[in-house]
């Protein structure tokens, strides 16, 4: 093929591809525009359609947090900061700080997997946008809180029992077949 015929072939290809692209563009001028509604205008809230283990923004139930720092150690990017001190008089563990930096969090779920009571878990909330990085730090402890101490038998406090059972159900979802079950579960 000579240089002139190759040049003419390239021009023909260029013109045909330009017309193909313009045909697609022109077809959109003739179509009626439509808008896909944002999920809040759907008949069912998006949060209600998400599965139980959806990895949304992290939440902590301080009522069942043991202060073991397992979630802080499991976090690969150090977005969880916990300060737990032992009260010298009562010999109880006090949580004075439990912060999660949502801006750093990569929603991996490792902190939820490591928690022995299921107190830290992902919610179905996915709209976490904000105007400043400082407002993306979730501070769960306002005043020092006594850490939960697990009982040897079933939980007897009617206020704590439903929270603990929800946390244990969350943990049970992580359990692998043949693996170690969370504390408090009977092997089948």
Image (cartoon, rainbow, N blue to C red):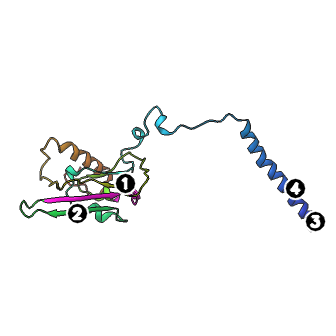
Nearer to us of marks 2 and 1 is 1
Residue at the disc numbered 2: 83
Q: CA distance from mark 4 to mark 3?
A: 12 Å
Q: Is residue 187 magenta?
A: no
Q: Is residue 95 magenta?
A: yes
Q: Earlier in the sequence, mark 1 or mark 4?
A: 4
* Corner quadrant of residue 35: top right
Nearer to us of marks 4 and 2 is 2
Residue 185 in view here? no
Residue at image x 34%, y 63%? 75
Q: CA distance from mark 2 to mark 1?
A: 20 Å
Residue 133 in view here? yes
Q: Nearer the viewer, residue 1 or 94?
A: 94
Measured as percent of width and height from the top left, residue 178 is found at 30, 56
| Mark 4 residue element | helix
Instruction: Identify the disc placed on residue 183.
Output: none
């Amino acid at each position: 093929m000579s240089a002139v015929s190759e040049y003419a072939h390239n021009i023909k290809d260029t013109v045909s591809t330009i017309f193909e692209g313009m045909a697609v563009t022109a077809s959109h001028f003739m179509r009626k525009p439509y808008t896909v509604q944002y999920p809040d205008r759907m008949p069912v809230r998006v949060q209600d359609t998400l599965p139980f283990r959806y990895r949304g923004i992290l939440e902590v139930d301080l009522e069942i947090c043991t202060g073991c720092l397992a979630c802080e150690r499991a976090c690969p990017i150090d977005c969880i900061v916990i300060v737990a001190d032992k009260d010298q008089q009562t010999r109880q563990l006090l949580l004075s700080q439990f912060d999660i930096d949502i801006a750093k969090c990569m929603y991996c779920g490792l902190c939820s997997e490591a928690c022995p009571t299921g107190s830290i878990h992902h919610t179905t909330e996915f709209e976490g946008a904000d105007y400043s990085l400082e407002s993306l730090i979730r501070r769960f402890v306002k005043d020092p809180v006594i850490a939960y101490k697990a009982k040897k038998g079933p939980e007897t406090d009617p206020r704590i029992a439903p929270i603990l059972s929800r946390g244990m159900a969350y943990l049970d979802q992580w359990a692998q077949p043949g693996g170690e079950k969370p504390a408090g579960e009977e092997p089948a």
